[in-house]
Each structure stands twice: as C-alpha cells, then as structure tokens.
C-alpha cells in the first residue's frame, strides 16, 4: 500500500507539487486518511500546493504571493456566527471550516476568509501541513 500511495502521489504532481484537492482525491481513491497522503508527500519531499482554504502554495512566499486568502468584502453574519461558535481559544480547524462551509453551502475559502477577518487562527490542516 505504501508503494502504491507513493506512486499515486508521484503520478498526480502538478509542476512538481501536489495540489491539496488532488491529495484529498487520492486519499478517497486509495481508502486512506488525508493525513496519510500528506505524510507520504512529506516523506517523498513533495510540497503540497493550492491549499483549498487559500493559505499557501500559490506562489513565492518571499514575494508575498504564497496565499490567496482574502477577507470578505461584505461579511456574512451567519457564516461568521458559525465560525465563532466552533472556534476555541482563538483557533478553528481546517476540518471545522470545511464542515461549516458545506453545511452553509459556501466555498471553503469564504469560511477561511471570514475566520481571518475575525482574527481566528486556522489550525490542524487535514493533510498535516500545519
């Protein structure tokens, strides 16, 4: 299984990196936890790119282009309230943001943008990146 997972990751690289959404699909196809895909990518020294929450992997970090996360132009109070309700000690997990976004029919990046606007730190990437 380990060799199969490594081969699947290598076969799905984009510009030498593994996009977050692709890693999620690999986990589903292979019947493994998302974290296992992230750990294998790390063991293979392959970076995860294009975080679905917009936090990293979009360009050069040294140039400030690594994330595309933006705070909302017009905040959604229902989404903001749901995030506040789930956050603990000023943090919310990646999984919680995806659950909230799904429940409210919103894109995950909307949820992460609202968390950022609220000053709530996003923690525990499902792939283990942070």
Image: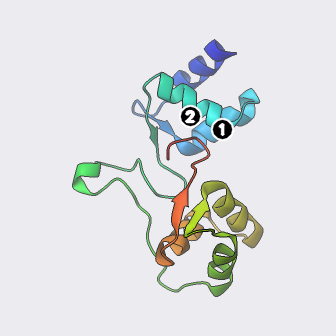
10 Å crowding of disc 2: few (<14), some (14-19), many (20+): many
Closer to the camera, 10 or 31? Answer: 31
Q: Which residue is mark 2?
A: 38
State the separation of the CA atoms marked 2 and 1.
Answer: 7 Å
Q: Residue at x 41, y 61 (%)?
A: 68
Of all residues, the one furthest to the front in this rendering is: 89
Q: Residue at x 77, y 68 (%)?
A: 103
For residue 17, the mark is none
Q: Circles 2 and 1: CB distance less than 8 Å?
A: yes
Q: Residue at x 53, y 61 (%)?
A: 122
Establish if 86 lies above or below 127: below
Q: Position of residue 66 (x, y in %)?
A: 35, 53
Q: Residue at x 33, y 49 (%)?
A: 59
Q: Which residue is mark 1?
A: 34
Which SS class for mark 1?
helix
10 Å crowding of disc 1: few (<14), some (14-19), many (20+): many
């Amino acid at each position: 299984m380990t060799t199969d997972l490594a081969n699947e990751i290598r076969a799905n690289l984009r510009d030498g990196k593994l996009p977050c959404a692709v890693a999620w699909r690999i986990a589903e196809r292979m019947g493994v936890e998302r974290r296992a895909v992230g750990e294998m990518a790390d063991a293979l020294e392959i970076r995860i790119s294009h975080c679905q929450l917009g936090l990293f992997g979009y360009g050069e970090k040294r140039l400030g282009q690594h994330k595309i996360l933006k705070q909302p132009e017009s905040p959604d109070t229902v989404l903001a309230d749901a995030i506040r309700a789930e956050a603990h000690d000023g943090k919310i997990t990646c999984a919680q943001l995806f659950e909230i976004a799904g429940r409210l029919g919103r894109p995950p990046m909307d949820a992460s943008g609202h968390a950022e606007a609220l000053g709530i730190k996003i923690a525990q990437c499902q792939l283990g990146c942070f």
